Amino acid sequence: MMKAASTKPVILAVSSGGGHWVQMRRLAPAFDGAEVHYATTDASAGDVIDPTRLHIYPDANKDTPLRLAACTLRIAWIVFTLRPQVVVSTGAAGGFLAIRLARLIGARTMFIDSIANARKLSISAQLSLGVADRVLSQWPSVAELTDAEYRGAVI
């Protein structure tokens, strides 16, 4: 007997650790009714997330090129294996990479810049402007200066 296909949309929520992870977890109620998978750099997230829906990738940035290559490969494996319909990220580099790769498979994407970026968009958010369906800033003044949108703050 064949397993029935899930009718729930698959969401991949991507966030590095620390404040990015806290903000992503605060968005969790918005994902009700979906099959949500989380990708993060924080292995301790397994304490609060179902381990079958948790994917860990290496933390990296533009100053760590070898780790960035490893991060890219791991994020690619996650995206191409899960094939999510939606990817949401609160940053940082891994989130941009997931959005970029998810666009290749036709996923809808959103990058929500950290509330800590009160004066300008992060590098990952700036890069996402040309790729993501939506880029949100949590500061109206930052949104006014960029092509990002303001829809309120997560925290």
Image: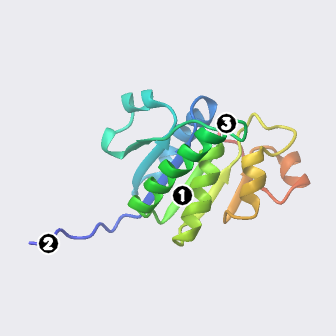
Q: Given this view, does label 1 or label 3 mark the residue nearer the observer?
A: 3
CA gap, disc 2 and disc 3 = 45 Å
CA gap, disc 1 and disc 3 = 24 Å
Q: Residue furthest left?
A: 1
Compared with residue 28, is residue 42 higher up or lower down, i.e. above or below?
above
Place residue 110 in its image quadrant. bottom right
User: Is 91 displayed left or right of 84 in the figure?
Assistant: right
Q: Residue at x 57, y 32 (%)?
A: 17
Place residue 148 in its image quadrant. bottom right
Q: Three-letter amino acid code at disc 1?
A: Val
User: Is 102 displayed left or right of 54 in the figure?
Assistant: right
Of pointers 2 and 3, the one earlier in the residue sequence: 2
Question: Callout 1: helix, strand or loop?
Answer: strand
Q: Are marks 1 and 3 in contact (CB under 8 Å)?
A: no
Question: Where residue 26 appears, x then y in whole percent?
Answer: 55, 38
Q: Three-letter amino acid code at disc 2?
A: Met
Question: Where residue 29 appears, x then y in whole percent?
Answer: 48, 46
Question: Where residue 14 appears, x then y in whole percent?
Answer: 54, 47
Question: Callout 2: helix, strand or loop?
Answer: loop
Compared with residue 14, is residue 4 higher up or lower down, i.e. above or below?
below
Q: Residue at x 17, y 68 (%)?
A: 3
* Residue marked by disc 1: 87
Q: Three-letter amino acid code at disc 3?
A: Thr
**Residue 99 image label:** none
Q: Are marks 2 and 3 in contact (CB under 8 Å)?
A: no
Q: Nearer the viewer, residue 23 or 29?
A: 23
Compared with residue 75, is residue 40 higher up or lower down, i.e. above or below?
above
* Residue marked by disc 3: 64
